[in-house]
Image: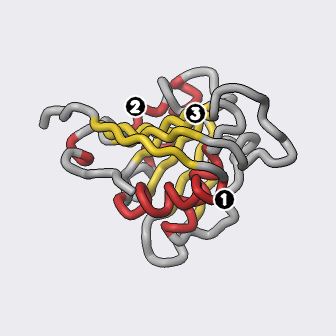
Amino acid sequence: MTDPTPASSTFTVADGDAMRALARDVLAPQLRAGDVVILSGDLGAGKTTFTQGLGAALGVRGPVASPTFIIARTHPSEVGGPALIHVDAYRLNSLAELDDLDLDTTVESSVTVVEWGEEKAEQLSQDRVHVVIAREVGGEVDMERPDEGLRTVTFTTHGDRWAGVALVG
């Protein structure tokens, strides 16, 4: 099949609760086993917070936390759905290191979310959703309240699996 033109949707969220709700209400209802989600954004943008919303909606065992130091974490479903494979590719230097995680053995039976996966995780599936999270421009991140501050979240779908799927809130 041909790869349809990628489709994009953009949302603005005010805080961590809104980020979790966006993941829970817009993307999670569309997800099924075999889906790959690539998350991009600066440090503190909300990638793990977004994944927490997905995990809650998918009914996986938690808590969903940043897998920065263990690279990949599996969250089995507690409701009979697919597991959530949560990967942090920040410390990976090459496609070969991502390949060493053997994600291809679980990708068909799980929902795979790869933080920092841009230009690394596309090899997992031509059918994927790329989520770009951008913090409000100006000012520094308040580390006392890192979940606060406007973010723009853009979903871009790729591949036949996502053709005709509308990600709307």
Dividing the image into 4 quarters, which one contains the C terminus? bottom left
Of mark 2 and mark 3, the one earlier in the sequence is 2
- Check disc 1 and report its element: helix, strand or loop: loop
Dividing the image into 4 quarters, which one contains the N terminus? top left
Q: Mark 1 is on which residue type? A: Val
Decide if residue 156 is on the left or right side of residue 103.
left
Q: Position of residue 15 (x, y in %)?
A: 65, 51
Q: Residues within 10 Å of mark 2 (few under 14, many from 20)?
A: few
Q: Residues within 10 Å of mark 1 (few under 14, many from 20)?
A: many
Q: Mark 2 is on which residue type? A: Gln
Of mark 2 and mark 1, the one earlier in the sequence is 1
Q: Mark 1 — residue?
A: 64
Q: Mark 2 — residue?
A: 123
Q: Position of residue 88 (x, y in %)?
A: 63, 39
Decide if residue 38 is on the left or right side of residue 116.
left
- In terms of depth relative to the viewer, which is nearer, 63 or 76? 63
- Check disc 2 and report its element: helix, strand or loop: helix
Q: Residues within 10 Å of mark 3 (few under 14, many from 20)?
A: some
Residue 115 appears in view: yes
Name the mark on residue 134: 3
Decide if residue 2 is on the left or right side of residue 43.
left
Q: Position of residue 68 (x, y in %)?
A: 72, 41
